[in-house]
Image (cartoon, rainbow, N blue to C red):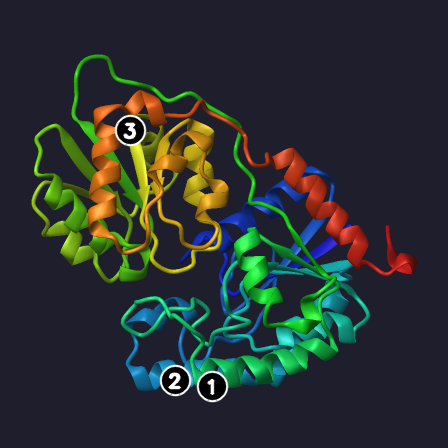
Amino acid sequence: MRVLMVSSLWPPVVLGGAEIYASALAERLRGNGHTVGVLTLGVDGQDVVGQVPSWPYAMQDYGSQTSARRALFHLADLARPDTHRILDRAMREFRADVVHSHVVQGMSASAMTAPARAGIGHVHTLHDYWLLCQRNSMVKRDDTPCETRCGSCRLIGGVRNQQIGRHAPDVVVAVSRAIEQSHLEVLPWMRGRSRVVYNPVSEPRARIVTPGPRPITFGFIGRLGVDKGIVTLLRAFARLDSDDVRLVVAGRGPEAETVAATPGVEFRGWVSGDEKDALLGADIDCLVVPSQWPDPAPLVLNEARSRGVAVIGTTAGGIPELIAPECVPLLVAPANVEALVESMRRFAEAPEVFTPAPAAEPIDWSAHLDAIETAYADAMPSTSAT
């Protein structure tokens, strides 16, 4: 099967888990004998067969732009005729059997409608809230979560989904029940097309525990933004005020300087590959995922699950669906410093109670690939299946 993936970003240009997952999926699909091509928003890389120009600047530079220039990016995301033309050419020249779209921010609704217009099967994975929110995150400019959809998002989302509804994806894959339900409540065109397929967990591997006493170590890995709860975590850690616990933070983002300036916090900056593996596999006892936005399905939860690392998470988004049963008693409400302090203390007092065994749950790569390949088969017109 020839699979054309559509993703705004692609390694080595990475901002979040969606493009990391999509790249890993491409590798696994190739291992199963499929041919994979990629169309991006101005990013070159392995398997890239087409690029929609990123205007007025590269998407990965969005966070450093002024409000006025951010508005220009959102304006371009409303209507981009060149997306349809470039995607149509890529589908034709690549000879795609099926299109699998991921995060398409910056490409406009044309990235969602072109496959149906061309008569090609289309699977779309819901990684974020782009269909509901112009910022694609359900988060305000100050990085605090939206309680309801604002007027501009209702207007922009209405225009966007009116276009998509006429040429909708054949199958919509949601990475959690939480994000599926939030979309089904608003988007009539999605009903009967959606299914939940959890992000895959890597092969279970035991942690390497260093002999001898050491402080209980909490860890944070991710984007350092208010919406990710990093400021709440720093405040909770300061309230612990104990020599028997430590906090290691890895990531990058607008709150990096705040993290670096917080006494007692070990800041490692951005980690990946072996560094990230060592952090999860040996250095921390408990991962803290204090998201304050409706985080659909943080990939780091799966990485912790495969390693048997305990997790303190919030009740936001899909997080409660993904943590191990042993960790459910540690769940806290988003942005609640007192509750987070209490859960961190509970873990520090009895870590063995909340530490799960390494597991490939809720779904491993083999089962995940089966589910994605089934989605492809269901999306493809019967006359074009190969």
Looking at the rendered image, the disc whose residue lies closer to the viewer, 3 or 1, is 3
3D distance between C-alphas at marks 2 and 3: 42 Å
The count of marks equals: 3
> In the figure, is residue 178 to the left or right of 339?
right
Q: Residue at x 74, y 51 (%)?
A: 375
Q: Residue at x 70, y 44 (%)?
A: 371
Q: Amino acid at mark 3?
A: Asp
Q: Position of residue 198 (x, y in %)?
A: 58, 45
Q: Which mark is residue 124?
A: none
Q: Position of residue 225 (x, y in %)?
A: 28, 59
Q: Give the residue at mark 1.
A: 75
Q: Give the residue at mark 3.
A: 285
Secondary structure of the residue carrying numbered label 2:
helix
Q: Quadrant of residue 162?
A: bottom right
Q: Give the residue at mark 2.
A: 71
Q: Position of residue 212 (x, y in %)?
A: 19, 13
> In the figure, is residue 337 to the left or right of 17?
left
> In the figure, is residue 223 to the left or right of 296?
left
Q: Amino acid at mark 2?
A: Ala
Secondary structure of the residue carrying numbered label 3:
loop
Q: Position of residue 135 (x, y in %)?
A: 42, 73
| Contact between labelled residues 1 and 2, with CB atoms less than 8 Å apart | yes
